[in-house]
Amino acid sequence: MRLPSRCIPVLESELQNTGVFAMNGARIVLTSIGVYERADKLAHELVERGLAACVNIVGPIRSVYRWKGKVENEQEYLLIIKTTAARAQELGAVFAELHSYELPERVEIEIAGGSADYLEWLGQLGTESQ
């Protein structure tokens, strides 16, 4: 939905007052891994390397997908990776190094709003004050 132009200055000033406007670089990156221990290892590595502020491991989940001409139905673990836009770009190289899949899922979602305090904390990713 496109807002009328007269609404935009009001919305921008409200977002600036909450701190959310300054944190428009927040991202959620999704990936899945078939073995819990590998999901746990990747989550820890991402946080330890300062590439993620937080990683949730959800599952097991069931994934149905087509791979190499065949429909697969597998148990997996979903990783919900909270990061910044800059760090999200670095995840591709780390996934190539650490992810166990030949073609790992890496889907990036821009965070449009949320708790100002949480987004401020997320924005400090990689700093000692985090």
Image (cartoon, rainbow, N blue to C red):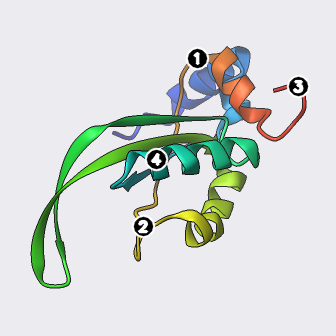
Decide: few, some or many residues near mark 4? Use Cα within 10 Å; few <14, some 14-19, many ≥20: few
Placement of 31 over or under 40, stated as above or below: below
Q: Which residue is tagged 1?
A: 115
Q: CA distance from mark 1 to mark 2?
A: 30 Å
**7 w.r.t. 90: above or below:** above
The label on residue 37 is 4
From where the camera sits, is residue 129 visible?
yes
Which callout, 4 or 3, points at the residue further toward the start of the chain? 4
| Residue count near mark 2 (Cα–Cα under 10 Å), binned few <14, some 14–19, many ≥20 | some
Identify residue type, mark 1: Ser
Considering depth in this image, is 47 or 122 the residue closer to the camera?
47
Neighbourhood count class around disc 3 (C-alpha, 10 Å): few under 14, some 14–19, many 20 upward: few
Q: Residues within 10 Å of mark 1 (few under 14, many from 20)?
A: few
Residue 101 occupies quadrant: bottom left
Judged from the image, the secondary structure of the residue bearing numbered disc 4 is helix
Residue for badge 2:
104
* Nearest to N terminus: mark 1 or mark 4: 4
For the point 68% across and 41% down, the residue is 47
